[in-house]
Image (cartoon, helix red, strand yellow):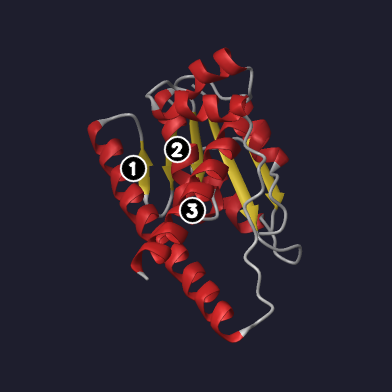
Amino acid sequence: MTKYGYARVSTASQSTKEQIQQLLENGVEKKNIFSEKFTGTKRDRPKFNQLLAGLKSGDEIVVTKLDRFARNTREALDIIEPLLDDNVTIKVLNLGTIENTSMGRMVTRTLLSVAEMERDMIVERTQEGKMFAKKNNPNFKEGRPKATITPKKRHAYELLISGKSYKEVESITGYSRSTLFRIKKKIEESEATMEGTATVKYSR
């Protein structure tokens, strides 16, 4: 079992020094700490992807806060769930330990409820904004979602939601775990937006 740490800041002016110190104090060796600077406009996290790629069953990831792990609850779940399937433990210093036990699964279910609430709020705000724009801007044109979800990506997503682990889907499709994270997130975001649009049209 290896204990890894991950530190992240959101802007170039911030420092990971304090996070790294907390990780060291919680038993993570310096050589096993991955850190990077990341903003909302920079989607790729090479250090984080490198960390995920090297994890093995029984390993542990330590982060200071859940928001260091992901930008929102849905993204955190997309990362946490396959790690639990692979028997990797996640220790969030201000939250507790999330592991593949009944208690750990209860934590993920709670996070899922929060994620669904966040998603519904985003869809609602998006549709309110569109309705306002349609009403007040005669030049408003609603764009269509980009058709970048290939049949192979859709197949990978369907395998994931059917209950197969990320490790199994990696073997079947050839996609890396980080790519599977992105595919799942993209499809679910796309379907959430379509759902919201359909709801607004139906309610008229």
Residue 96 appears in view: yes
- Give whichever of discs 2 and 1 has the lower sequence position: 2
Q: 93 or 179: which is nearer to us?
A: 179
The x and y percentages for residue 23 are: 55, 46
Amino acid carrying mark 2 in the image: Ile
Q: Residue furthest top?
A: 171
User: Where is residue 166 shown, x and y percent of the image?
Assistant: 49, 24
Element class at badge 1 = helix
> Are there few (<14), some (14-19), or many (20+) residues within 10 Å of tag 3?
some
Quadrant position of residue 203 = bottom left
Per the rendering, the mark at residue 194 is 3
Circle 2: element type = helix
At x 43% / y 47%, what residue is drawn?
92
Q: Quadrant of residue 54?
A: top right
The x and y percentages for residue 32 are 63, 33
Assess whether mark 1 and mark 2 are in contact (beta carbons under 8 angstroms).
Answer: yes
Q: What amino acid does circle 1 point to?
A: Thr
Which mark is on residue 108? 1
Residue 172 point in image, percent of width and height: 55, 13
Q: Of 147 and 117, which appears nearest the observer?
A: 147
Nearer the camera: disc 1 or disc 3: 3
Tell me: 118 left or right of 25. Answer: left
Residue named by callout 2: 80
- Dot 1 or dot 3: first in sequence order is 1
- The CA distance from mark 2 to mark 3 is 26 Å
Towards the viewer: 91 or 81: 81
Task: Mark 2 or mark 3: name the one nearer the start of the chain.
Answer: 2
The local secondary structure at tag 3 comes to: helix
Q: Residue at x 53, y 41 (%)?
A: 187
